[in-house]
Amino acid sequence: MYVPDLNEACDWSFPIPLLYGPGRLAELGDLCRSHGVKNALIVTDRSSRDLPFIQGALDALAAAGLKGAVFSDVAPNPTDKNAEDGFAAYRAGSHDGVVAIGGGSGMDAGKAISLLAGKSGDIWRFDYDMSVDETLSAGDFPPLFCIPTTAGTGAESESTAMVTDTKALTKRCIWHPTHHPRAAILDPAVTVGLPPRLTAWTGIDALVHAIEAYSVPDFHPLCDGMALQGLTLVYSGLPKVMRDPASIPARGTMIVGSCLSGIAFLKGLGLVHSISHMVGAEFDTHHGLTNAVLLPIVLRYNETSIAGKVRAMSQSMGLETTDFDGFYAAICALLDDCDIPRSLAEIGVEIDEQGIQRLAEKAVRDAATGTNPAEAGVSEIADLIRRSLVAAR
């Protein structure tokens, strides 16, 4: 079997320019300059502000003769207020481009700020479920560049962002069809210092993306191919990177697998995400960890509906058996190896029956519920949440 050399740099052009390779963060300045950016706003989350890759990004801008500043007032689950404050910083600093760097929170916040910079005002005018503002085109938005520092979210190649509505306490998807990152840098060296638990949580997030995207019951061979390849890389790469966190090939396997899985979910996602979005909005739980806890119970719920998909996923994972029970057992074993808690209660979700119903009513309206392979209404989602509070696997 062909094994690529993940120590080498590679450039890919689909669906946006992707610059892969260790050390390529140093090319950020040249990349910005090539798109006419002279004063970039670097957007990241609070916990990442003082990590080495932020200074690395600033150094790369300076080496290219460019200005740069950092906005990091971003919560683990970015809010509308974070986006508005970031846009104020963008405008006050006379910036002309956005570098979104970090995990999903930093990249989602950067995308939201870039959207607002295209047309200031209410961020919810970009709600995915609202009519598209056809007066805007790609040239109205400042250049946006994404740099993932975890291998999980897969948000670097897509236009959408998840933002918490602080009034409704729900997560909403924002986008504009002409708003896309100009390029993404996939530098596995940036992820080497990621703590073990975040490596695990974000890695399982990528696994969920691949499984849910492939399970969507639509014909989309492009996304299906990427989902299966992403599943192969993440399932094989996560144990390796947990054993040897400093391995560039292992980190490279994960960041590429995460990117592929992120592209794949353009096809859609499922109940793991729709429930996780609302749990995160109310309890500010880590998205990847919440997904990891919910994955087994949703797989069981979808068992009959994904019967025709399990064989291909099992083969992509290199399993000896290709039935649902073997597939499910392998997923649970990986979760155990990554010390993933077995219930929502263990990650701080304390909620009464009224709260369960409230979460279910919000989750049923999430776009990911509509692409779940098995239909689910409020009662079914409430039951999944109720059981997940005690034991999700």
Image (tube, rainbow, N blue to C red):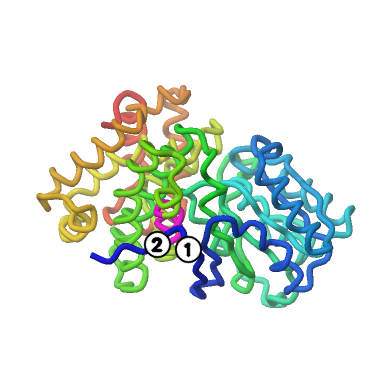
- Between 386 and 209, which is closer to the camera in this rendering? 209
Q: Are marks 1 and 2 in contact (CB under 8 Å)?
A: yes
Q: Mark 1 highlights which residue?
A: 8
Quadrant of the rendering where the N terminus is positioned: bottom left
| In-image side of 255 versus 26 (left or right) | left
- Residue drawn at 60 percent across, 38 percent down: 76
Instruction: Name the residue type under label 2.
Output: Asp
- The amino acid type, in three-letter code, at marker 1 is Glu
- Looking at the image, residue 73 sits to the left or right of residue 383; the answer is right
For the point 16% across and 56% down, the residue is 307
Q: How many C-alpha atoms fall within 10 Å of the one at disc 2: few (<14), some, or many (≥20)? A: few
Residue 284 at x, y = what percent? 56, 33
- Residue for badge 2: 5
Secondary structure of residue under mark 1: loop
Residue 255 in the magenta stretch? The answer is: yes
Can residue 305 be seen? Answer: no
Foreground residue among 238 and 379? 238
Q: Is residue 340 left or right of residue 70?
A: left
Between residue 110 and residue 366, name the one nearer to us.
110
Decide: is 361 above or below 350: below
Residue 218's spot in the image, x, y percent? 30, 68
**Residue 206 counted in the magenta span:** no
Residue at 64 percent of width and 70 percent of height: 182
The disc at residue 220 is: none
**Boundaries of the magenta span:** 253-260
Question: From the image, which quarter does the C terminus lie in?
Answer: top left
